[in-house]
Image (spheres, helix red, strand yellow):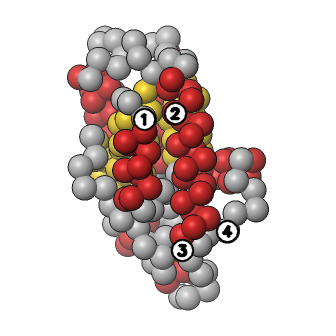
Amino acid sequence: MPGFVVWFTGLSGAGKSTLSALLANELRARGVHVEVLDGDEVRTHLSKGLGFSKEDRDINIRRIGFVAKLLARAGACAVTAAISPYKDVRNEQRAQIPHFIEVFCQCPVDALASRDPKGLYKRALAGEIAHFTGITDPYEPPDNPEVTLYTDRETQAESLTKIIAALEQRNLIPVR
């Protein structure tokens, strides 16, 4: 089986980290070598010191893409879970990475705000947080993701099933 990248994108709180962890566990159970590149962890270690300007966000996503490409080239699965708000940089990564599977975690802002345990959306909507993606900074949804998850109305199990089916259909993982 070839190495591949599962690239989660979506707004903060849409389920990227949760679903990437569930996917990684399922893939490991199938014998796939998986590494998860979580946006928050990457910002702490690989992209420390970057801010939230468009330029800094693009640098962060390019760093994630570079590591993901290396992992896939070595035959592993890299799962990325970062907002990655700009289409052009996501498409740039797609063009550089064979076997790139984009997973869009679609969730309306009102649903995100209602389930936001840290109150970030409430603060952003009140103008207390600058550069908050989807509120004061743009988020550009993908045009043609391989998988779209509706995390406000699907269960985690339903979403995971959709991702696994897409990977099996592309012969990236063995069919069970």
Query: Mark 4 and mark 1 in contact (Cβ < 8 Å)?
Result: no
Alpha-carbon neighbours of circle 1 within 10 Å: few (<14), some, or many (≥20)?
Answer: many
Q: Which mark is in front, 1 or 3? A: 1
Q: Earlier in the sequence, mark 1 or mark 4?
A: 4
| Residue 140 pos. (x, y %) | 36, 65
Label 1, label 4: how far apart the Cα atoms are:
26 Å
Is 45 left, or right, of 138 in this rendering?
right
Residue kind at label 3, given as amino acid type: Phe
- The N terminus, quarter of image: top left
Q: Residue shown at 27%/30% (left/top)?
A: 166
Query: Mark 2 and mark 1 in contact (Cβ < 8 Å)?
Result: yes
Residue under label 3, please give it.
Answer: 132
User: Do we see residue 101 in this rendering?
Assistant: yes
Q: Residue shown at 55%/50% (left/top)?
A: 62
Q: Which mark is in front, 2 or 3? A: 2
Residue under label 1, please give it.
Answer: 97
Q: Earlier in the sequence, mark 2 or mark 3?
A: 2
Residue under label 2, please give it.
Answer: 69
Label 1, label 3: how far apart the Cα atoms are:
28 Å
Residue kind at label 1, given as amino acid type: Ile
Is 13 left, or right, of 105 in this rendering?
right
Residue under label 4, please give it.
Answer: 51
Closer to the camera in the image, 131 or 152: 131
